[in-house]
Amino acid sequence: MRMVDLIRKKRTGGELSEAEIRSIISGIVSGEIPDYQTAAWAMAVCFTGMSDEETAALTMAMAHSGDVVDLSAIRGVKVDKHSTGGVGDKTTLILAPLVAACGVRVAKMSGRGLGHTGGTIDKLESIAGFRTELSREAFFAQVNEIGAAVIGQSGNIAPADKKLYALRDVTGTVDSIPLIASSVMSKKIAAGADAILLDVKYGSGAFMKTAEDAIRLAQAMVAIGTQVGRETVAAISDMDQPLGRFVGNALEVLEAIEVLRGEGPDDLRELCLALGAHMLVLGRRAADPESARARLAEALASGAALRKLGAMIAAQGGDPAVTERPELLPAAPNRIPVLSETDGYVHGIDAEAVGVAAMRLGAGRAAKDDAIDHAVGIELAAKRGDFVQRGGTLAYLHARADDASAGEARSRLLATYRLAAEPPASLPLLYAVVTQYGVRY
């Protein structure tokens, strides 16, 4: 069937067959289908949606458009974890060694940061000598021996998704639940894990601005996982302010080490315990989240999780001494306070704006080829619910110099804070959990 007929079929609400969807994806990758027809088809999907069966077929077609990793050489159940993106989200740095210390295999491929969201690979490269590129054989051997490895994503994972997303980004077709869900899940399925935990963010720093939209996306992704035989669970979590206290590469590694020491900010530690509990259940290492959480807490208290991080760093060429001496991490020469202009309780912090301010300091990329400064970033001294007096410190800039760029970042950061006379209502860090059986609040 011609592409124009498939566009018309989808535009009028018809359901595409698996063979038709495979034909579309094959044509996109080969270049046989021109960009204008691909964009027209994506717009038709935005208007009319897709069934669960269509979305699963699209996901698998994109997953198989490039390399599909076979993790069968790794013993045990392999559990992958994916966040839909946020600011200060360093959970992978904590969860990989933490759940590995409890016996779950974590063979994870991660990406780099772009725009206001940070990338796990950039953060790990803050550690001197840390290698994020390993051969498949070395990757598998490390996970078998240590239980965890985090490496850069292969350039040929789901190439159809890369082509389709680039067009969606410039044609106003990004915000389609089936297209977002298939984009995320195609990469997770191609990465080869047996089970998948999704951390679906909502709020000012997330793509999904409301919890309701985040649940809709989570349900679509869980349905895909179920359709293709991957046990999938999604946690809906708050990103209406940055996670933890630090935003920036080396600063987030420092905070991850603090949590693995049994310290660190309450929100970050609590979220990691909640997510990690689901990973242990998915990995068949605990019967339920409650008993899983107790195992994770013990791994933190005993130092087993921190030692596992040290072993992972050493195996990937880095200096494991950083886990005991975080001062070995890169540090910016200036720590510049951002002072409040009024009294009040912090009601909100625009997480996306914080991420952009950190990017302007050099902690992120405006374009994919930009260089990263691992040392710079932002430290939040006050978060939602805290009372701040006029002249009190809201945050600190970790910057190379106290110059015009730091002044711009200071102004941006000051504008991200919303203060009021009365304390704000408390909001749940974890809003809901979505499984194939429904939504649990």
Image (spheres, grey):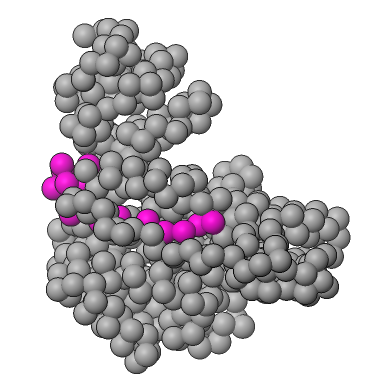
Q: Quadrant of residue 98?
A: bottom left
Task: State the residue at coordinates (21%, 9%).
Answer: 1
As displayed, is residue 297 above or below residue 54?
Answer: below
Task: State the residue at coordinates (21%, 34%).
Answer: 52
Between residues 263 and 237, which one lies in front from this camera angle? 237
Q: Residue 205: in sight, yes or no?
A: yes
Name, please, the residue furthest toward the bottom: 302
Magenta residue check for 233: yes
Magenta residue check for 97: no
| Magenta stretch bounds | 224-240
Image location (x, y in percent) of residue 410:
78, 60
As displayed, is residue 355 above or below residue 255?
Answer: above
Task: State the residue at coordinates (44%, 33%).
Answer: 175
Q: Residue 333: in sight, yes or no?
A: no
In this rendering, position of residue 85 left or right of residue 67 = right
Image location (x, y in percent) of residue 438:
21, 51
Between residues 87 and 107, which one lies in front from this camera angle? 87
Image location (x, y in percent) of residue 5:
27, 7
